[in-house]
Amino acid sequence: MILSDLNITMIASESNILIPPWLQSRPIGPSDLMELQTLLGPQPGLTFRDIGWNKLIQYFQNTSGVQFYRLLRLLGFYGVQFSGKLSSYGSIAPEHPLLFSIPEQDRARPLQASSDLPLAIVESLGMKYLGQLHGVPFENLAQFLPTISPKELAAKLRVELTAAHDHFFRAVTSVFSLPPAPLPQTQIVEGDDPLDLLNLSERSWNGLIAAKIRSISELVQKTEDDLMQVRNLGRKSILEIQEKLERRGLRLGMQSTSLETGITAEPASSDLSQPEVLARLSTPIHDLFLSVRSRNFLAERGVQHMWELVQLTLRELERARNIGSKSIEELKTIVAQMGLQLGMRFTETQLKAIQSYRPESVAKVTSDWFCMTAQTLTHHSLDFLSDFQKKILWERTWAIRKKRTLESLAQEHGMTRERVRQLERQALEQLHQKFRQELGQATMHLQSQVERRGGVLELPELRGAWIELEAIEQRIIEGLLELQTGSIEINWDQSQICWKA
């Protein structure tokens, strides 16, 4: 959906902007993000109440499409909601959310990537100071950190959380205060806790295993300098390891004690306030693409849903009868693809929420992801590719009409056909890596729905905006599916997804 002055005006006429009462009085000043300052201009004393479609259209006309969509995401992050075609950019927070309350004297404190928040979050939001989180709903930040609780995140940032009320930005009354808690010098961890509970990337996992580090207990006794000496373990992997340990209340350089009888924090459960997390956990086992051996093993144990599977630990699987190493690896892979982990624990309240969740809304989650990703890639989010790789995607890989040949691109840029082919393959691999987890989950759901309907799934059954997509967006979705699987295809003329012939 490439926006022009004409269709942004049409979208504006069909959409509403809802600014919650507690957010309306939030002032926008020189310490705020540049997008907010540019939106309302230099006039002092303006608040979120002054944001409207006239301002947004003017901002769109004076900036690029990338900046416009970044502004929409930013407004949604602060709590603004949109209706109509832009509804997915709006806030996910409830009507009266918990808000970050930053004391005035702390608002100038710089946000530190990897210590306060992961680098990717700090960079994507463009935030530099703690005060820019003042008044942000906890749920809108927690979507990037699904395994952390409100109190844990507030303690990590050394701030407070306050229930939203209409006078929040005029007189703040704290619900609870969380003073900074010093990290203990000694932490009790369980000696046999396997590394896979950390759900690390393949590169990090392989590097640790090659260094004969096979348990969390062994890992936390290593220092950052120790890990820097490990072959094939770079700075990015070490940051990932530190972040995953921190989520469990652990860190590098700790002294492990009581390894036989000690305890460790339970594996952090995902944020069950997120519909997509509930959808994954409530997925029936028969919807998963598993081998007969793995499926029979789970049936023997009475495991019928994903939430039952993820409560099994790796140790239980390895000690179980009638399951081999290949089946264990298959189960680990399917769990990781859904953004979950083995050994999860749930409270009684969480189990009730999972069991009462209606799985049919998974279809909308899947549809929304495919449609929004296609629309996003139409405008931007290809910054991780070179200009020539982008050109290959637009003029060859995703071309709608006449597809550029390898020969014509090679001649135009003075290189061989094989080099063009290599750059195209690299671009697709980078694209697949960027969306690997979400694409794997969404594709798996489509495959299971096609299988359950005898090989043909009608697009309207999925709900979402499939029918409204433009031709280039349709082609991008086809390309995403081709990256993940060769078993299904979309027939846009007949509005069907079916098995490939």
Image (cartoon, rainbow, N blue to C red):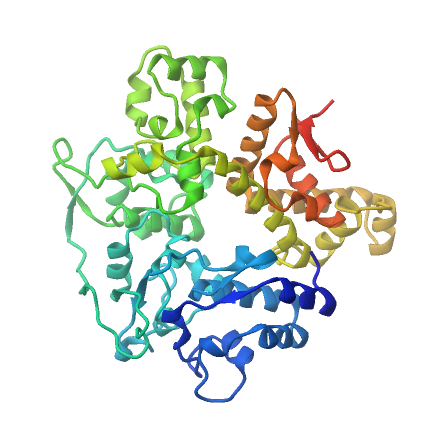
- As drawn, 247 above or below 303: below
- As drawn, 398 above or below 99: above
State the image coordinates of residue 491 (x, y, percent, origin top left). 74, 34
| Residue 433 found in image quarter | top right
Is residue 347 visible to the viewer in this orientation of the structure?
no
Q: Is residue 34 left or right of residue 219?
A: right
Q: Nearer the viewer, residue 211 or 356?
A: 356
Q: Nearer the viewer, residue 494 or 108?
A: 494
Is residue 303 visible to the viewer in this orientation of the structure?
yes
Q: Quadrant of the C terminus?
A: top right
State the image coordinates of residue 266 (x, y, percent, origin top left). 23, 39
Q: Is residue 387 left or right of residue 160?
A: right
- As drawn, 291 above or below 369: above
| Residue 137 found in image quarter | bottom left
State the image coordinates of residue 472 (x, y, percent, origin top left). 74, 49
| Residue 134 found in image quarter | bottom left
Q: Quadrant of the N terminus?
A: bottom right
State the image coordinates of residue 448 (x, y, percent, origin top left). 55, 26
Q: Residue at x 43, y 44 (%)?
A: 275
Q: Please state the total of marks drawn on the protein image.
A: 0
Q: Is residue 164 left or right of residue 388?
A: left
Q: Nearer the viewer, residue 427 or 80?
A: 80
Q: Is residue 319 left or right of residue 499?
A: left
- As drawn, 106 above or below 312: below
Q: Residue at x 55, y 65 (%)?
A: 16
Q: Residue at x 23, y 35 (%)?
A: 348
